[in-house]
Image (spheres, rainbow, N blue to C red):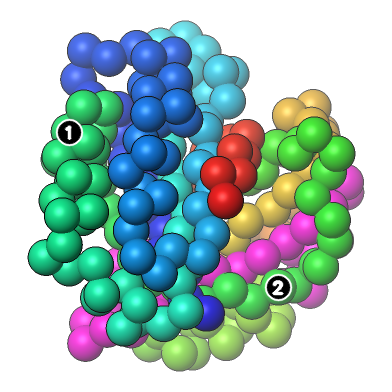
Amino acid sequence: MIKAISWFRRKPGMSVEQFQQYWREEHPKVVLQLPGLRKYVQNHVVESQYAGGRQPFADGVAETWWDDRDAMRAHRGTPALTNLLADELEFMDPAHRTTILTEEVVIVNGAIPPGGGVKLITWLRRRPDLDLDAAQQYWRTNHATVASAMGGLRRYVQCHARPAGQEYEIMGLPLVWFDSIEQVRANATSPELAATRADEPNFLQADLPFVVVREHHII
């Protein structure tokens, strides 16, 4: 199984509410027409991320699951893909849209909190002196143990970028579930998070963007 992760910003001039409503209610109608799609999850950035007029790193993060690369290639040139790309222009800014292919590594196999809770998504950039394999191995083994100790963590999945003839700037995205936004905030000053941050320079660059989101499971 392979997972594509796409992140993007809303169309200029569109409010956050309009963007989230269109994405949740209208866009799935075209996404679900893609042949071979196994699972589709939308991640909507929580309201507090926009406080003070801030613009988060992304307004939305989409996750889609496929059997393999061939299953993804099967929709190339189809009317379904043409319709999807046309519909994206109704609510996305095409200048701020990126997709990478990833492989999931489940670190903490806990249940998603009742009601979905909230999910922390972070974009990781590897240290330039480490190759992709070395950075991902450290993340999967050493760093996973440290990060798993965060208080209130319900589930933790690492999404490792898959090489496709090039070196991705983003080496992967950790997905971490908590019961509430309050639990995320409580971790901000915890010794466990301090230990996690202290370990990051061993394989990552600084200034890692993140968003806090709520999931919407489409299929």
Could you tell me residue 13's position as x and y percent?
Answer: 21, 12
Could you tell me residue 45's position as x and y percent?
Answer: 52, 30
In-image side of 178 versus 61 (left or right): right
Residue located at (23% from left, 38% from top): 88
Residue located at (49% from left, 89% from top): 134
Give the quarter of the image for residue 113: top right
Helix, strand or loop at label 1? It is loop
Residue located at (51% from left, 65% from top): 38
Magenta-tinted stretch: 144-171
Looking at the picture, does residue 192 appear above or below residue 36? above
| Residue at mark 2 to residue at mark 1: CA–CA distance | 34 Å
Task: Inspect the magenta stretch and tell me whether residue 145 lies in it.
Answer: yes
Q: Report the number of discs.
A: 2
Residue topped by disc 1: 89
Residue located at (20% from left, 55% from top): 81
Give the quarter of the image for residue 74: bottom left
Query: Are discs 2 and 1 less than 8 Å apart at CB?
Result: no
Task: Inspect the magenta stretch and tell me whether residue 151 lies in it.
Answer: yes
Residue topped by disc 2: 106
Bin the neighbour count of mark 2 within 10 Å (Cα to Cα): few under 14, some 14-19, many 20 and up.
Answer: some
Closer to us: 187 or 164: 164
